[in-house]
């Protein structure tokens, strides 16, 4: 039960970070980054 | 059961089979999803994003990565490193490689700290300074899922010739071969010593809602759980170690039913 006192605020904090990031356009930026072939990942540059 | 889920997730996250004839990677909205497993978004079949790649991208643009940190934290708080044991395609490969009959080597505990150095140096500090995603440049999973299929001509001849003339590709291929060879002899070699994602999620193991509990009144410390554990942790002394990938192999072999997986 005691654990919930720190787990609930932390979970809420992390969930709010997801929404905060989404509000700042990070989902679109993630999509843009992941939709082009990552040249570092495949070993070109 | 775990093998089936690992295989199912491997296919699910790499199910853009239209890449076979369209000759392009998936660009749909599912790529906004960062599942905390190592699955390279340069893989022609990949439908989701690699969280380490996205984390580095935001670091190179010097923007705080709210979304990715939120995903790590939310899933970490609920599940700890569960995704490493049950979903990660690279972890699945490691589990299969270790099944190859050979002389096995036990990794000393100190080596497991190196993944934190990889996280701090290659994923955070160097990308911040150089504006380049340096972990991606060396990542063996990127070579396996992205580099090799494209070098085989999966996305056309132009990219194939570019890759085959790039020294970086050969460096990445050498790293991949080394990781594969070491994984035959050492349990989950990459996950325990290099994986920055495992380092991040491991930080949540001690506080996550999903946790292991050992009933001391039942446990006779026979050591069967330690010998089966894919990350060599001492389960009855430290059941929620940052190394634990929640695979539950220990529970399967415990004939006293002393190990419990709890959500609380």
Image (tube, rainbow, N blue to C red):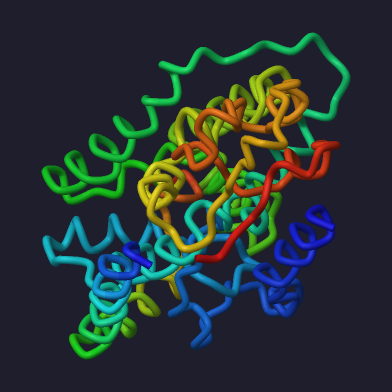
Q: Is residue B188 above or below residue B74?
A: above
Q: In this view, does A6 lie above or below B53?
A: below
Quarter-of-image position of residue A36: bottom left
Quarter-of-image position of residue B215: top right
Left or right relative to B120: residue B224 = right
Which x, y percent locates residue B118? 33, 33
Left or right relative to B161: residue B224 = right
Which one is nearer the viewer's eye here, A25 or A10?
Answer: A10
Which one is nearer the viewer's eye here, B74 or B118?
Answer: B74
Left or right relative to B57: residue B179 = right
Which one is nearer the viewer's eye here, B213 or B57?
Answer: B213
**Residue at 17% over, 51% down:** B131
Which x, y percent locates residue B25? 58, 72
Which x, y percent locates residue B255? 85, 37
Which x, y percent locates residue B127? 21, 46
User: Disc count in the image?
Assistant: 0
Q: Is residue B212 above or below residue B218?
A: below
**Residue at 71% over, 47% down:** B248
Quadrant in the picture for the N terminus of chain B: bottom right
**Residue at 64% over, 26% down:** B177
Q: Which residue lies furthest to the front in this view?
A: B217
Which one is nearer the viewer's eye here, B203 or B210?
Answer: B210
């Amino acid at each position: 039960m005691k654990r919930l006192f720190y787990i609930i605020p932390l979970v809420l904090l992390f969930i709010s970070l997801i929404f905060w990031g989404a509000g700042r356009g990070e989902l679109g930026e993630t999509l843009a980054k992941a939709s082009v072939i990552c040249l570092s990942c495949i070993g070109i540059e | 059961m775990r093998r089936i889920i690992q295989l199912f997730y491997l296919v699910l996250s790499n199910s853009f089979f239209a890449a076979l004839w369209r000759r392009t990677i998936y660009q749909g909205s599912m790529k906004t999803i960062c599942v905390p497993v190592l699955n390279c978004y340069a893989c022609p079949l990949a439908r989701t994003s690699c969280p380490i790649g996205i984390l580095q991208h935001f670091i190179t643009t010097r923007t705080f990565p709210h979304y990715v940190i939120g995903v790590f934290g939310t899933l970490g708080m609920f599940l700890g490193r569960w995704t490493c044991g049950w979903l990660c395609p690279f972890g699945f490969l490691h589990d299969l490689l270790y099944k190859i009959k050979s002389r096995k080597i036990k990794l000393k505990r100190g080596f497991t700290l190196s993944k934190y150095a990889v996280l701090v140096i290659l994923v955070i500090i160097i990308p911040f300074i150089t504006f380049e995603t340096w972990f991606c440049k060396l990542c063996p999973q990127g070579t396996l899922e992205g580099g090799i299929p494209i070098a085989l001509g999966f996305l056309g001849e132009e990219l194939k010739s570019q890759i085959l003339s790039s020294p970086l590709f050969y460096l990445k291929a050498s790293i991949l071969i080394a990781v594969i060879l070491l994984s035959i002899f050492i349990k989950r070699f990459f996950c325990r010593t290099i994986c920055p994602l495992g380092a991040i999620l491991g930080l949540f193991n001690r506080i996550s809602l999903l946790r292991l509990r050992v009933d001391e009144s039942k446990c006779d410390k026979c050591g069967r759980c330690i010998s089966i554990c894919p990350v060599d942790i001492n389960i009855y002394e430290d059941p929620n170690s940052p190394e634990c990938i929640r695979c539950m192999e220990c529970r399967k072999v415990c004939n006293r039913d002393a190990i419990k997986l709890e959500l609380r």
